[in-house]
Image (cartoon, coloured by chain):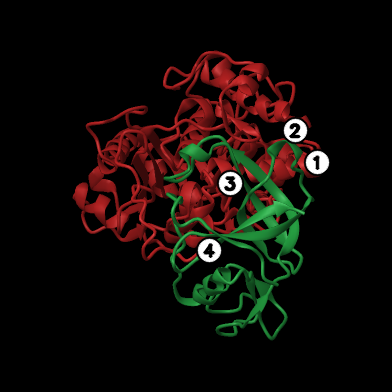
Chain colours: A red, B green
Amino acid sequence: MAEPILAGVAESELGETPDRNWLDNAAIATVRALEDAGCSLADVDGVAVAGGNDYMPALVLSEYLDLDEPSFLEGTEIGGSSFEHFCGHVRDAMTRGEADVVVVAYGSTGKTGPGRDRSLEETHPVDGFVRPTGLFRPPGAYAMAARRHMHEYGTTEEQLAEVAVSTREWASMNPKAAQQDPITVDDVLESRQIAEPFNLLDCCLVSDGGGAVVLVSEEKARELGVPEIAVAGVASTSTHRQDISEMPDMTTTGAAVTGPNAFAQAGITHDDVDVAEIYDSFTYTALVTLEDLGFCEKGAGGEFVSGGTTAPGGELPMNTQGGGLSYCHPGHFGIFVLIEAARQLRGDYEGDRQVDDAEVAVAHGTGGLLSSSSTVVLRREA
Amino acid sequence: MSAPVEDRRESWDGPVPVPTGATVPFWEGTLEGDLRYQECDCGNRQLYPRAVCTDCGAEDPPFEESEGVGTIYTYTVCHVPGEPGFADRTPYIVGAIELAEGPRLLALLDADPDVLEIGASVAVTFWRLSDEAAMPVFVPE
């Protein structure tokens, strides 16, 4: 099986982009990522897009970029994990010789764009069971799962806060991060209540922005002369969708399935992982995913994240750009975990921001209301 | 069972359920104070109502009446309104209720947040929100 090479990565402007729509941001990120890979729009023969709230997004972006009859088109929408999920389909397409240069793109105006249509008419029947309860989604849904984890395993609000504190330490070294001032556990606990047990600093930012990665065949990568960051393992699954009460076990996510699958494909163990980019829509998202991926025992996530394990200099550097909690979160954060994983493996940074000699990275996406999980293992070829 | 149904049509500004397809019998039951779930001939029980059994695939599994009691699987206290019409209501409690019959249901909890706990017993009541539907709301037993 071919292993696609992650040849280029880029973001559009992040934060507030009131003069751009989702498509503008996706397109800007795409051309920047192609430039990063040393190729151009003329080389692109595949496009994979999610987010953007548009019908037929792969066609929309293909038209916008005036792509020349792309042979690979992908628009599967599984929320924030879509882009990790795409990596598997791209691998399959490259194995079949269907595409050599595929752009995986995302754009959003989650902060300044128009609000969602709130009509209940002709929507999914479960909406009638969820929306009248007033549950603030997604925070309230994740909060309910976190509460259950606290009940079953004794996880504390302080331990959840540790995730935000460590993540902010990384953000303090990232000029692109929206929030860079260091915070303490007390700062998290004293921030505004959102949905118990979550306070404001347990929750991700809301941003505009886009991101893109360029996946190329091994042959094309050699031609381009890029560092060979290989997609060595990919797995996806889902457990439910709109209604958090449908999640079979709120303390175990689909990462418990996708982690072992992706690790086995890549032939790695946890000791091989140098850097982890783990979707952190909320502090709990990262904590439970670390458990499910097997970085610690089930239920021991609170203990694991305490004391700076995932902070700069820690045993498992995690969310080294500042994560969804401090860097940006336009809605589907999954593209940004791939971008940062690639940059760490390429050694793009200096000083403490760079994880020493990083060869293997895990990029994990989560979508919906803890609903979908996709794990990608990236490996820098010697 | 027939649990109390309180008419909240005048005072409710939030979203109201729209009965469609397989959910129609559920919402009809709520107007009478009945909490219904689907129990297929194969034994599978499910909520929300669906046109097929999620276990054996049988079409339109029949409805049964719940006893209307269960336990709190988990809950959150919302300090930020998640829907229109909830601003004056904050903080309010949303729980995932595990019915005695098995299925889980997302619902408002009409209770004091300070004494709530996971595993506590709760019973259903209904708030009538429209001519077509009343919403299940759970109270501590």
Residue B118 place in picture, x, y as percent = 76, 47
Quarter holding residue A119? bottom left
Q: Nearer the viewer, mark 4 or mark 1?
A: 4
- The mark found on residue B134 in the picture is 4
In the figure, is residue A294 to the left or right of A375? right
Provide the secondary structure element on which disc 3 rests.
Answer: helix
Q: Nearer the viewer, mark 4 or mark 2?
A: 4
Q: Residue B130 or A182: which is nearer the viewer?
A: B130
- The mark found on residue A141 in the picture is 3
Q: Are marks 4 and 2 in contact (CB under 8 Å)?
A: no
Instruction: Estimate the spatial distance between the alpha carbons at disc 4 and disc 3, rounded to whole Å.
Output: 23 Å
N-terminal of the pair, mark 1 or mark 3, is: 3
Give the residue pinned by disc 2: A302
- The mark found on residue A153 in the picture is 1
The amino acid on which the numbered mark 3 sits, given as a three-letter code, is Ala
Q: Are marks 2 and 3 in contact (CB under 8 Å)?
A: no
The amino acid on which the numbered mark 2 sits, given as a three-letter code, is Gly
In the figure, is residue A238 to the left or right of A297? left
N-terminal of the pair, mark 2 or mark 3, is: 3
Q: Nearer the viewer, mark 1 or mark 2?
A: 1
Instruction: Work out whether disc 4 and disc 1 sit on a shared chain.
Output: no
Quarter holding residue A281? top right
Instruction: Estimate the spatial distance between the alpha carbons at disc 4 and disc 2, rounded to whole Å.
Output: 40 Å
Provide the secondary structure element on which disc 4 rests.
Answer: strand
